[in-house]
Structure formats: structure tokens, C-alpha cells
Amino acid sequence: MSDHYQPGLFDLRESEKSEFLKQIGDLIDRKLQAFAREHLIGQQLLYSKKQAARLLGISPASIGRLVAQGLLKARALGGRRLYAHEELLKLLKRELPASISQPSKAPAAPKLLRRAG
């Protein structure tokens, strides 16, 4: 143990505590803003189907299956369907069902017969 007395937070007067806590709050705010500038600002918020598929490592058709199964929400904007960054992150954090990467086993449409000619 040290022989010196080192004042702590509780040894400060109320006005000093208030100022100390304000300085800590300001420091935290500056650190959070710096983090946001470095990691979040400039991040794309909405993605096209093709971009979303590339980010998830699946085909654009699989994006459609995710939406149909209610696993991914699409937003309509200007007649386009877009996919939010947060929604894509949620999907990356969970395991996707195998049925997403494989088309359903629906019967194929009948082929048209060619005219002999």
C-alpha cells in the first residue's frame, strides 16, 4: 500500500464531481463519434437484389426465396425492391435453410413442341 493519500471521486465536492462526470461523458461522446466515422459512415444502407445476393454469397433467385419465406424483408422505393443493411446482417448471423440455395422441386412447365418444317 502507498503512504500517500490519493483523492478519489467521492472525495470531490459536488461541483467537482459534476464537472468530472461531464468531462467523462464528453470523452465517451468523442470516442463514439470517432468510431462511427471510421466504421459506420459511408456504409451503404440499402442494396439491390444483385448486391444483396453478392453480400450473402447466394444467387439473386435465392434472395427471392428468402423474401417468399419471410426470412428477408424488402422495401419498395421508387418502384425498386431494396434490402436494408441491417436485414442482411441479421441473415449473416444465422444459418440459412438449405432450401434457400436450392430451387423448390416444383414440376417444370411443359416444353412447347416445335413445328416440323
Image: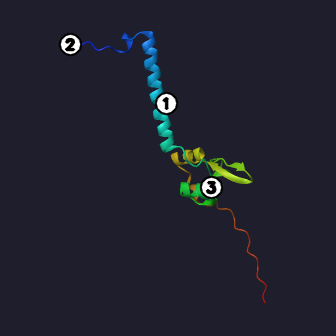
Which secondary structure, mark 1? helix
| Residue 43 in sight | yes
- At label 2, the amino acid type is Asp
Q: Are marks 2 and 3 in contact (CB under 8 Å)?
A: no
- At label 3, the amino acid type is Ile
Residue sitting nearer the eye, 29 or 85: 29
**Residue that mark 3 sits on:** 63
Q: Is residue 11 left or right of residue 53?
A: left
Disc 1 or disc 3, which is closer to the eye?
1
Q: Residue at x 45, y 29 (%)?
A: 27
Which secondary structure, mark 2? loop
Mark 2 and mark 1: Cα distance apart in space: 36 Å
| Residue 99 in sight | no
**Residue that mark 1 sits on:** 29
**Residue that mark 2 sits on:** 3
Q: Are marks 1 and 3 in contact (CB under 8 Å)?
A: no
Residue 107 location (% of width, % of height): 69, 65
* Looking at the image, residue 70 lies above or below residue 9: below
Q: Which quadrant, please, contains the N terminus?
A: top left
Residue sitting nearer the eye, 57 or 66: 57
Q: Residues within 10 Å of mark 1 (few under 14, many from 20)?
A: few
Residue 40 location (% of width, % of height): 52, 43
